[in-house]
């Protein structure tokens, strides 16, 4: 293209999302910008919280194998759920800071908890909280 600079594969660039320095060879082109592996996965592997089919499937698995929702959680999901349950409510920001995870990583974990009907969002005084189901 006219005016477009060809990039050398050994050239270093900054990730457009997190700012880390990465080589062009190790980057992904997303929405016109270069991103690192972690940011690419974060942008492309989002879990959708409100998905009735996934929630229905989770109930069907539970009915067929008898394994309860809490037993299906991995360690981080258990920790997040226990924190929310012990406090009664938490914001996404609070969870992100508590568990040292990005907002989208926390949202992915919360989507799974939502699919298992362990947590839900609740608006209190114009603020969104995650609460036990």
Image (cartoon, helix red, strand yellow):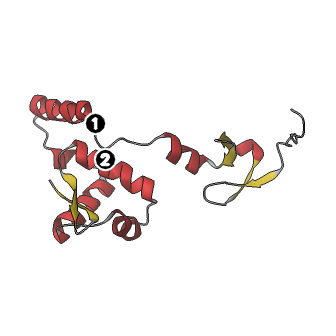
State the residue in front, 41 or 51. Answer: 51
Count residues near mark 2 (Cα–Cα under 10 Å), then give few for <14, some for 14-19, many for 20+. Answer: many
Specify the quadrant of the image occupied by residue 46.
top left
Identify the residue shown where x is 76% and y is 46%: 24
Q: Percent x, y for residue 28?
A: 67, 41
Relative to 23, say whether 45 is above or below.
Answer: above
Q: Residue furthest front?
A: 126
Q: Percent x, y for residue 60?
A: 15, 29
Relative to 21, say whether 71 is above or below.
Answer: above
- Number of labels in the image equals 2
Which residue is tagged 2? 111
State the residue in front, 94 or 25. Answer: 94
Quadrant location, the N terminus: top right
Residue 93: image tag? none
Which residue is tagged 1? 51
Relative to 102, say whether 56 is above or below.
Answer: above
Specify the quadrant of the image occupied by residue 26.
top right
Identify the residue shown where x is 37% and y is 49%: 108
Q: Percent x, y for residue 65?
A: 13, 31
Q: Along the horizontal axis of the image, is 32 left or right of 56?
A: right
Count residues near mark 1 (Cα–Cα under 10 Å), then give few for <14, some for 14-19, many for 20+. Answer: few
Is label 1 in a helix, a strand or a loop?
Answer: loop
Comes first in the chain, label 1 or label 2: 1
Identify the residue shown where x is 61% and y is 59%: 18
Is label 2 in a helix, a strand or a loop?
Answer: helix
Identify the residue shown where x is 10% and y is 36%: 66
Q: How far, Cα to Cα, is label 1 from label 2?
A: 9 Å
Foreground: disc 1 or disc 2: 1
Q: Percent x, y for residue 49?
A: 31, 44
Asked whether the residues under the numbered discs 1 and 2 touch, taking CB atoms below 8 Å apart as contact, a structural biologist would say yes
């Amino acid at each position: 293209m006219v005016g477009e600079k060809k990039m050398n594969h050994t050239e270093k660039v900054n990730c457009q999302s997190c700012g880390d320095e990465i080589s062009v060879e190790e980057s992904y082109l997303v929405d016109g910008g270069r991103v690192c592996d972690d940011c690419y996965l974060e942008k492309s592997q989002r879990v959708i919280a409100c998905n009735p089919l996934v929630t229905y499937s989770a109930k069907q698995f539970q009915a067929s194998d008898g394994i309860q929702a809490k037993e299906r959680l991995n360690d981080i999901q258990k920790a997040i759920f226990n924190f929310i349950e012990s406090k009664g409510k938490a914001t996404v920001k609070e969870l992100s800071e508590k568990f040292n995870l990005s907002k989208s990583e926390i949202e992915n974990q919360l989507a799974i908890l939502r699919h298992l009907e362990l947590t839900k969002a609740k608006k209190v005084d114009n603020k969104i909280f995650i609460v036990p189901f």
